[in-house]
Image: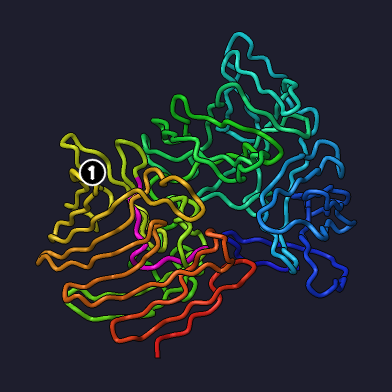
């Protein structure tokens, strides 16, 4: 038995095990399936290509000799218990190693008496459950939900899913309640129009405030990664009791794990690791309960100092929110890894290292401002003729951002992603930030011409998605080396400058 914080959530697990020694260099995928009641699931079918296996009496499995690289793991929990889901998830299989997956928690299907017949042919049908006050899913008149087998769904039920026993990674932000729809079948389906959602305002937002509606999409389709997806925004009711999805916003896909939905605080969806939060419990930030690490690797003084400073946050804001994995790997960001996101024509979002996020709303003069954080009082964002966006601070400093970054393994630029390319102080001293076409840092140039250079290398030859920052070198020749775990591609060690 063990308890601990994983991705910011306290989890407790109890497991029995039998130790099996496999052959050295064997390729395998291992994991465990458990019901949210704690009961292990025996007989869950798993397959990657022709490699197949089932879970044992303790819910454990070891899938031997699967193909390596990014693969789709087929999961058939309905074999273990009728009504459990059939779905798929993406895994990356490391050659010559055992790839261990997190425990998969599955919720048993509701009993028959909790299902409601779908009857929305001529009028909207609101699905509720007396156990969950304030929770409602609306089936608009005439909307149908078609299963992947082509059969229409005929009944529906609601269940609340515990945060510490999710069948998927936790949602990308601060939330309290997660709910899921069940149809009494092992396979999910797609509604002919998104289903509006109403959930309790347990985030403590003010009346009229906004929250993001997210849902999990297992997307069992080749080339479509399973992920949390943003459905749109919801608005807090006038009495402050509920959050109601905005017109046209709703859940677009359902399955055994698809459609798992929640509202997330729109202003700062994960507790911010911004300046001023208590760090007495280092490396655990006491203000947000997250394991944070930071370090200065190189400092080159000057009229504008050039600093190579890295910070770790398990939330991984760029990977989950900006949709852009940085070049130190999951969770890590450098001090100049700052993004400005074009959320929509009326909203810009500044994403800082460590996952501090700030939203700037469009004004009548075309500029964008933030009215909620004192740090940005008097600051404005505007777009120049060449498409560069400039964040001007009230003290005269300015940051410039440019879009068009392709990212690793992509063929087209990432829409709406603008990265920092220049910092200028009020005396017109400039720190120029050069990036490669994928958005990775290439060099920093100070006003006197001195530079810091960045070297990016492929951990796997020919695989552009494996690109990682491997060296930083300053004008004096001092270097910092970065090494990575070959399987997970996560940062493993840093060798400081001599």
Q: Which residues are magenta?
A: 330-341
Q: In percent of the image, x 74 and y 26: which residue is there?
A: 115
Compared to 368, does 295 lie above or below? below
Looking at this view, name the residue that lies furthest to the bottom. 498
- Observer-nearest of 395 and 444: 444
- Observer-nearest of 110 and 222: 222
Q: In percent of the image, x 54 and y 48: which residue is there?
A: 176
Give the colouring mode of the picture.
Answer: rainbow
Q: Provide residue 220's location: percent of width, then percent of height.
A: 68, 39
- Observer-nearest of 487 and 339: 487
| Helix, strand or loop status at disc 1 | strand
Looking at this view, name the residue that lies furthest to the top. 122
Q: Provide residue 389's location: percent of width, then percent of height.
A: 24, 49
Q: Quadrant of residue 113?
A: top right
Looking at this view, name the residue that lies furthest to the left. 427
Q: Quadrant of residue 422?
A: bottom left
Q: Provide residue 336's location: percent of width, then percent of height.
A: 33, 65
> As drawn, is 28 to the left or to the right of 335?
right
Q: Provide residue 452's location: percent of width, then percent of height.
A: 31, 76
Compared to 138, does 33 lie above or below? below
């Amino acid at each position: 038995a063990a308890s601990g914080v994983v991705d910011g959530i306290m989890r407790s697990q109890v497991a029995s095990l039998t130790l099996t020694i496999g052959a050295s260099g064997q390729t395998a995928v291992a994991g465990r399936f458990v019901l949210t009641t704690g009961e292990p699931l025996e007989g869950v079918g798993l397959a990657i290509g022709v490699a197949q296996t089932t879970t044992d009496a303790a819910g454990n499995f070891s899938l031997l000799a699967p193909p390596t690289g990014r693969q789709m793991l087929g999961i058939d929990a309905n074999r273990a218990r009728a009504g459990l889901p059939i779905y798929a998830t993406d895994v990356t299989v490391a050659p010559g190693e055992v790839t261990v997956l997190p425990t998969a928690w599955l919720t048993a299907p509701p009993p028959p008496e909790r299902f409601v017949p779908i009857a929305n042919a001529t009028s909207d049908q609101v699905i509720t459950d007396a156990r969950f006050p304030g929770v409602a899913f609306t089936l608009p008149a005439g909307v149908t939900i078609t299963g992947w087998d082509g059969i229409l769904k005929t009944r529906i039920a609601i269940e609340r899913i515990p945060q510490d026993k999710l069948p998927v990674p936790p949602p990308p932000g601060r939330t309290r309640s997660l709910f899921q729809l069940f149809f009494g079948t092992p396979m999910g389906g797609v509604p002919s129009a998104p289903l509006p959602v109403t959930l309790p305002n347990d985030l403590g937002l003010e009346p009229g405030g906004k929250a993001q509606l997210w849902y999990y999409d297992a997307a069992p389709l080749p080339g479509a990664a399973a992920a949390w997806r943003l459905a749109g925004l919801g608005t807090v009711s006038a009495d402050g009791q509920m959050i109601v999805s905005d017109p046209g916003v709703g859940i677009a896909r359902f399955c055994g794990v698809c459609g798992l939905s929640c509202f997330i605080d729109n202003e700062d969806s994960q507790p911010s690791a911004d300046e001023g939060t208590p760090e007495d419990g280092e490396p655990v930030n006491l203000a947000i309960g997250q394991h944070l690490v930071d370090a200065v690797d190189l400092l080159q003084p000057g009229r504008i100092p050039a600093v190579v400073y890295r910070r770790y946050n398990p939330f991984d804001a760029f990977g989950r929110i900006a949709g852009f994995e940085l070049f130190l790997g999951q969770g890590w960001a450098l001090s100049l890894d700052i993004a400005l996101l074009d959320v929509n024509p009326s909203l810009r979002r500044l994403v800082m290292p460590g996952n501090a996020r700030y939203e700037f709303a469009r004004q009548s003069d075309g500029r964008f401002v933030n009215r909620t954080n004192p740090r940005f009082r008097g600051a404005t964002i505007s777009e120049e003729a060449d498409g560069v966006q400039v964040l001007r601070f009230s003290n005269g400093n300015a940051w410039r951002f440019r879009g068009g970054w392709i990212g690793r393994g992509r063929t087209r630029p990432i829409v709406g992603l603008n990265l920092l390319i220049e910092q200028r102080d009020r005396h017109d001293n400039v720190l120029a930030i050069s990036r490669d076409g994928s958005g990775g840092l290439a060099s920093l140039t100070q006003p006197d011409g001195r530079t810091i250079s960045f070297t990016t290398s492929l951990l796997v030859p020919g695989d552009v998605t494996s690109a990682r920052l491997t060296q930083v070198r300053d004008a004096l020749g001092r270097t910092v080396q970065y090494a990575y775990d070959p399987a997970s591609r996560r940062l493993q060690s840093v060798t400081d400058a001599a």
